[in-house]
Image (cartoon, rainbow, N blue to C red):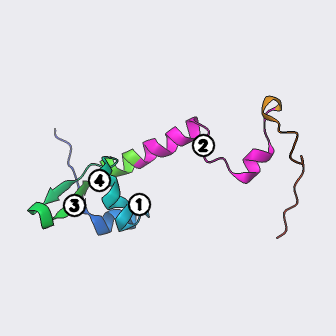
Amino acid sequence: MSKKVRFIGIQEASDITGLSLTTLRRGVESGRFLAIKSGGDKGRYLFDEALLLKTLQDEALSRVKNDERRSYLASLFKDDDEADDSKPQSATITI
């Protein structure tokens, strides 16, 4: 039994992922995203939908594991060894 691959165009990839067309094109050119270019040099990119979503999921999980992009609220609850004495330990949020 073979796995069916669903190829989508760049506009649909943008709609599904929320990434801009420019980000997707640059991602293909840099090797971040895999795509097929159909129709030669002036052709269009076709993305394997499942592979594109898996790539983005893996990137997101990698950031979490590497503790990148911590939110402001998460930064308020630092471990004792991470404490920065130069910053106040409380914050005020106005809504």
Q: Nearer the viewer, residue 35 or 7?
A: 35
Disc 4/disc 3 C-alpha distance (Å): 9 Å
The three-letter code of the residue at mark 3 reads Tyr
* Disc 2 and disc 4 in contact, CB within 8 angstroms: no
Q: Earlier in the sequence, mark 1 or mark 2?
A: 1
- Residue receiving disc 4: 28
On the rendered structure, is 59 left or right of 10? right
Highlighted range, magenta:
56-79
- Residue receiving disc 3: 45
* Disc 1 and disc 4 in contact, CB within 8 angstroms: no
On the rendered structure, is 61 left or right of 47? right
* Disc 4 and disc 3 in contact, CB within 8 angstroms: yes
- Residue receiving disc 2: 68
Disc 3/disc 1 C-alpha distance (Å): 15 Å
Q: Nearer the viewer, mark 3 or mark 1?
A: 3
Residue 59's x, y, as percent?
A: 46, 44
Q: From this view, report whether residue 52 is shown above or below residue 22.
A: above
The three-letter code of the residue at mark 1 reads Thr
Disc 1/disc 2 C-alpha distance (Å): 20 Å
Mark 4 crowd level (few <14, some 14–19, many ≥20, 10 Å Cα): some
Q: What is the magenta segment's predominant secondary structure? A: helix
The three-letter code of the residue at mark 4 reads Val
Q: The N terminus lies in which quarter of the figure? A: top left
* Disc 2 and disc 3 in contact, CB within 8 angstroms: no
73 within the magenta span: yes
Q: Secondary structure at mark 4?
A: helix
* Disc 3 and disc 1 in contact, CB within 8 angstroms: no
Query: How many labels were placed on the picture?
Result: 4
Residue 48's x, y, as percent?
A: 25, 52
Q: Earlier in the sequence, mark 2 or mark 4?
A: 4
Residue at the spot 18% in from the left edge and 65% down from the top edge: 44
